[in-house]
């Protein structure tokens, strides 16, 4: 899988911002977010990897946290900036973070690794580790399965193709440990909504 597959995925998100908001705005992972935030002090600084149109970022800011959201879809970031003024949003690649070492108290990566090529996962996790403060907390979720593929996303009309990476829980846990994280909790379960058709891996860890 090459960079052209990532470009195709970004273009697909750019084309479907409005429909994506309708589909995903109500799918904030409440249970996982509550656990993640419980490890952070009041007004802690959170990096939201693959923030899309800002769903999770605005919920975190409403709870008093400071948030920087990044995404490679320019249209998603434009919409996030329009919708929410209380968080900071930037176009940025999760594989090459433009932040200093130890900058964030927490890193939130909800359903972003399902679009990261397997070959880039170790480096991407190391980047998340690098920008976290000591004892900083990291949440990551990914789709359960095996392999990677570029295929149509039939939830949207038109020629909408996305690149997908699939993982096993043990596989992702091992990658996190190799990147220097201590795993606090991990589990795999089916999401209770019609938008997500596969089981999701949820992992909470600490630097």
Image: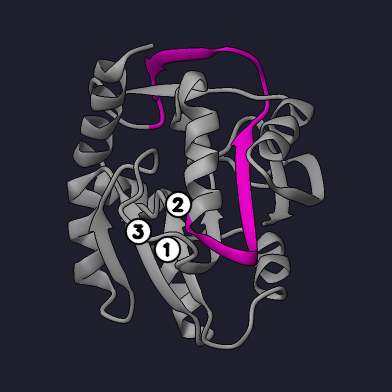
Which residue is found at the position 39% from the left and 43% from the top?
A: 94
Distance from Cα at disc 1 to Cα at disc 3: 22 Å
- Picture quadrant of residue 12: top left
Residue picked out by circle 2: 24
Q: Is residue 102 above or below residue 168?
A: below
The secondary structure type at the circle numbered 3 is: loop
Is 25 one of the magenta-colored residues? no
The secondary structure type at the circle numbered 1 is: helix
Tell me: 58 left or right of 138: left
Q: Is residue 148 above or below residue 181?
A: above
- Majority SS type along the magenta span: strand
Q: Which residues are magenta?
A: 131-155
The secondary structure type at the circle numbered 2 is: helix
- Residue 164 x, y percent position in the rendering: 47, 23
Categorize mark 3 by other alpha carbons within 10 Å: few (<14), some (14-19), many (20+): few
Distance from Cα at disc 3 to Cα at disc 2: 28 Å
Nearer the observer, 123 or 140: 123
Which residue is found at the position 70% from the left and 38% from the top?
A: 201
Residue picked out by circle 1: 55
Badge 3 or badge 2: first in the primary sequence: 2
- Residue 135 x, y percent position in the rendering: 68, 66
Badge 1 or badge 3: first in the primary sequence: 1
Residue picked out by circle 3: 99
């Amino acid at each position: 899988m090459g960079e052209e597959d990532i470009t195709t995925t970004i273009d697909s998100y750019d084309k479907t911002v409005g429909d994506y908001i309708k589909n995903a705005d109500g799918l904030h992972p409440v249970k996982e977010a509550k656990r993640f935030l419980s490890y952070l002090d009041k007004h802690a600084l959170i990096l939201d990897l693959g923030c899309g149109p800002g769903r999770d970022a605005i919920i975190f800011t409403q709870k008093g946290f400071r948030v920087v959201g990044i995404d490679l879809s320019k249209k998603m970031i434009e919409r996030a900036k329009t919708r929410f003024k209380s968080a900071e949003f930037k176009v940025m690649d999760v594989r090459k973070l433009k932040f200093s070492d130890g900058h964030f108290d927490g890193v939130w990566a909800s359903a972003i690794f399902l679009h990261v090529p397997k070959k880039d996962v170790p480096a991407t996790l190391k980047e998340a580790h690098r920008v976290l403060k000591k004892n900083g907390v990291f949440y990551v979720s990914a789709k359960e399965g095996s392999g990677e593929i570029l295929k149509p996303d039939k939830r949207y009309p038109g020629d909408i193709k996305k690149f997908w990476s699939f993982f096993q829980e043990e596989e992702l846990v091992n990658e996190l440990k190799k990147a220097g994280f201590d795993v606090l909790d991990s589990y795999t379960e089916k999401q209770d909504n019609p938008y997500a058709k596969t089981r999701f891996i949820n992992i909470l860890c600490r630097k």
